């Protein structure tokens, strides 16, 4: 690291700063700073004392001028008030005399008008009493007429209410009788439809299990009242292609009937399904667990998801095998012709040229960035070296704690050295 030389301000001699010299310089600088601060404090105290004295003198002069001006204004105000009160008193006396004369004249006029008003008021009171008497007579007559009409209306209302009550009572009796008949009919239908409802619940649950277990497949429920099985599972592969169909019939009865097998086989042919499955609560006598009988698979409700998975896998394998055998010789010939043809050759050349061009472009960008990074590292190193020199010079004069000249954080000070 390069050492900075210090020039003496007195003799101009340059010398290398050592620890002893640095401490001596720092000691002298601190003593000079202390003497300078003491001198400045003494000058400030003197100036402050002189300023306070001048301020006190100015305040005394201002108070004296204010007292004189206050006395003068008070004297002028007293004289003005005396003159104003004298003139106002004379004017008010004249106004009062004139006002008394006017008030006497107005009083006479007011007494005359009051007498006329009293006379008119007596006449109005007499007419009002006569009118009130006539109105009371009229009200009594109208009240008697109204009471007669009200009694007639009340009698009609009571009669109408009695009629309405008898009608509503008859309607309630009729409704009660109809409700009894309806309750009996609903009870009868409920007893008849309980077995059908249980079967429909099992059908819906079977559809939900198949849909949740095989989300890629299509589950087609057969509507109520439509001839056919309960639901059809259309098996789809991962590409969404239809590979086959499984038809299901759900039964929830106490006994197994062999007629179900023939009926489901007929439904399988009409729907174009590949496999038929009967999901039953009661197994046939010759089967204690799921199995195949007369071309139809039979299982319980607990076994249907496992059996459906096995049957679905077999359908997918058969579909894949059949598709792989279709036009096998023609496909091999077409693939060989394509790989040896000019179209494949030109496409591969285009891909290779694009790859090489991209690789060269990336290499050029990498070389350019490395050159740019190397130049910036040199610039940064130069800045750090100069900053270190400047920091050492200032710390040699003012101390290491006087000024913070770190370019980096405290944790990264090692980068400067």
Image (cartoon, rainbow, N blue to C red):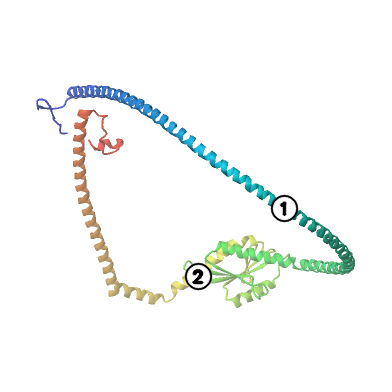
- The kind of secondary structure element at disc 2 is helix
Mark 2 Cα-neighbour bin, 10 Å: few <14, some 14–19, many ≥20: few
The answer to which of marks 2 and 1 sits earlier in the sequence is 1
Q: Mark 1 points at which residue?
A: 112
Q: Position of residue 379 (x, y in %)?
A: 19, 45
What residue lies at 54% left-to-right and 42% top-to-bottom?
91
Q: Quadrant of the C terminus?
A: top left
Q: What label sits on residue 89 in the rendered view?
A: none
Vertical relation: 98 (above or below) 338: above
Q: Quadrant of residue 186?
A: bottom right
What residue lies at 63% left-to-right and 46% top-to-bottom?
101
Mark 1 Cα-neighbour bin, 10 Å: few <14, some 14–19, many ≥20: few
Q: Name the residue under label 2.
A: 318
Q: Where is residue 29 in the image (x, y as percent from the top left)?
A: 21, 24
Question: Can residue 341 be spotted in the picture?
Answer: no
Instruction: Give whichever of 135, 42 is nearer the camera.
Output: 135
- The kind of secondary structure element at disc 1 is helix
Q: Position of residue 111 (x, y in %)?
A: 72, 50
Is 18 situated left or right of 415 in this image? left
Question: Can residue 233 be spotted in the picture?
Answer: yes
Instruction: Give whichever of 348, 368 is nearer the camera.
Output: 368
Q: Where is residue 309 in the image (x, y as percent from the top left)?
A: 56, 63
Front label number (2 vs 1): 1
Is 41 situated left or right of 73 in this image? left
Instruction: Give whichever of 182, 114 is nearer the camera.
Output: 114
Vertical relation: 14 (above or below) 311: above
């Amino acid at each position: 690291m390069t050492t900075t030389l210090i020039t003496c301000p007195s003799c101009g001699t340059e010398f290398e700063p050592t620890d002893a010299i640095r401490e001596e310089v720092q000691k002298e600088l601190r003593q000079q700073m202390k003497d300078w601060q003491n001198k400045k404090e003494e000058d400030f105290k003197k100036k402050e004392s002189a300023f306070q004295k001048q301020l006190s003198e100015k305040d005394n002069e201002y108070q004296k001028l204010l007292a004189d001006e206050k006395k003068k204004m008070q004297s002028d105000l007293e004289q003005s008030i005396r003159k104003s009160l004298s003139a106002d008193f004379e004017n008010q006396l004249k106004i009062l005399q004139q006002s008394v004369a006017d008030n006497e004249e107005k009083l006479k006029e007011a007494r005359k008008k009051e007498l006329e008003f009293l006379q008119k008021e007596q006449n109005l009171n007499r007419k009002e009493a006569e009118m009130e008497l006539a109105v009371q007579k009229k009200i009594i007559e109208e009240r008697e007429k109204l009471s007669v009409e009200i009694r007639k209306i009340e009698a009609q209302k009571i009669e109408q209410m009695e009629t309405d009550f008898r009608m509503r009572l008859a309607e309630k009796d009729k409704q009660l009788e109809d409700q009894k008949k309806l309750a009996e009919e609903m009870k009868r239908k409920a007893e008849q439809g309980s077995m059908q409802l249980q079967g429909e619940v099992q059908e819906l649950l079977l559809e939900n299990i198949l849909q949740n277990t095989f989300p890629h497949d299509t589950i087609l429920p057969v509507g109520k009242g439509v001839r056919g099985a309960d639901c059809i599972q259309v098996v789809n592969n991962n590409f969404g292609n239809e590979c086959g169909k499984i038809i299901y019939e759900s039964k929830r009865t106490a006994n197994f009937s062999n007629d179900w097998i023939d009926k489901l086989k007929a439904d399988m042919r009409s729907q174009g399904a590949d496999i038929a499955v009967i999901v039953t609560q009661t197994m046939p006598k010759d089967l204690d667990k799921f199995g195949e009988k007369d071309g139809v698979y039979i299982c319980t409700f607990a076994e249907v998801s496992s059996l459906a998975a096995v049957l679905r896998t077999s359908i997918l394998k058969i579909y894949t095998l059949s598709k792989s055998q279709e036009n096998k010789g023609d496909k091999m010939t077409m693939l060989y012709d394509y790989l040896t043809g000019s179209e494949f050759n030109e496409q591969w050349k285009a891909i290779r040229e694009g790859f090489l061009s991209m690789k060269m472009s990336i290499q050029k960008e990498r070389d350019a960035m490395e050159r740019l990074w190397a130049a910036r590292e040199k610039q940064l190193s130069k800045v750090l070296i100069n900053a270190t020199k400047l920091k050492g010079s200032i710390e040699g004069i003012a101390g290491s704690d006087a000024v913070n000249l770190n370019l980096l954080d405290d944790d990264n000070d090692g980068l400067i050295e």
